[in-house]
Image (spheres, rainbow, N blue to C red):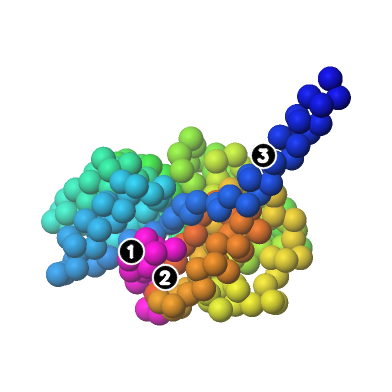
Amino acid sequence: MRNIFIFMVVFIFGLAIIFWLKPKKYSYIIPAYIPLGERFDAAFDEIAEFSKINKVVVIVNPNNGPVSRRENKYYFEKLEDKIKQIQNNGGKVIGYVASGYGSRGEGEVRKDIDLWEKEWNVDGIFLDEGVGSCDDSCEILIKKYQDYYEYIGDKVIVTNAGYIDENYEKFLKNGVIMIIFENTYDKFISPKNYLDDLDLHSGEKGVLLHTSPVDIDKKKLKRLYKKYDLDYIYLTSKNWDTISLKLLEDL
């Protein structure tokens, strides 16, 4: 009996070690802010193909927010086809809405959300310029974003807080993905990353790393992804264009 007990303890301990050492697989948020032109079809085709074998949430942003079919029928139909292509290959697509760090009028934000939901077959909303760090106005902002979440309903929601403090959990809701760090890749891997001072074990989280070089330290990035209990990574190049999918494949 004693031997069986020892075996079970060793077995469970071994499983825990294996689980801890196992690399955490990346999921991606891809900013597909792609204008019409020679790269439009190729870039979206690459994202759709990437979506077949990776967990991907793609942000589409026609004009700092949605456009209607009436405004630009040709562009609308071109992008509509690309959205379907990504979705058919297993990816999720969400529409861009600016929230002005909480300062944009709620009516304007809801108008953009309505346009995405009524005219576009998207899976959810990207609330950019969100607020995860606040001072005296914290409770007001928390209520505002919680109201947005309620308004969007049971869809994919990504909020780009950019910078967070210990209040970030109050901006969360089940199903909301919070971008908790928006800065350069170099700042993220530096010893002065403010995320080290926070408890990050609540909610789904991602990081937005801009000005990412092509020669990133893949091992360090993977270690930090696991350390901060991240669920998504969002990379942009120097010009904030969609990062090379080849780089993502190499991670």
Residue type beneath disc 2: Thr
Q: Give the residue at x 58% y 69%.
A: 220
Q: Which residue is mark 3?
A: 15
Q: Nearer the viewer, mark 3 or mark 1?
A: 3
Nearer the observer, 190 or 156: 190
Nearer the observer, 50 or 136: 50
Whole-percent x, y for residue 173 in the image: 61, 42
Q: Which residue is mark 2?
A: 236
Residue 244 visible within the image: yes
The span picked out in magenta is 238-251
Sequence-first tag of 2 and 1: 2
Quarter location, residue 42: bottom left
Does 146 appear in magenta? Answer: no
Q: Give the residue at x 58% y 50%.
A: 22
Q: Which residue is mark 1?
A: 245
Toward the top, the furthest residue is 1
Q: Is residue 130 left or right of residue 156?
A: right
Q: Is residue 40 above or below residue 124?
A: below
Nearer the observer, 212 or 183: 212
Q: Give the residue at x 60% y 77%.
A: 187
Quarter location, residue 46: bottom left
Residue 114 visible within the image: no
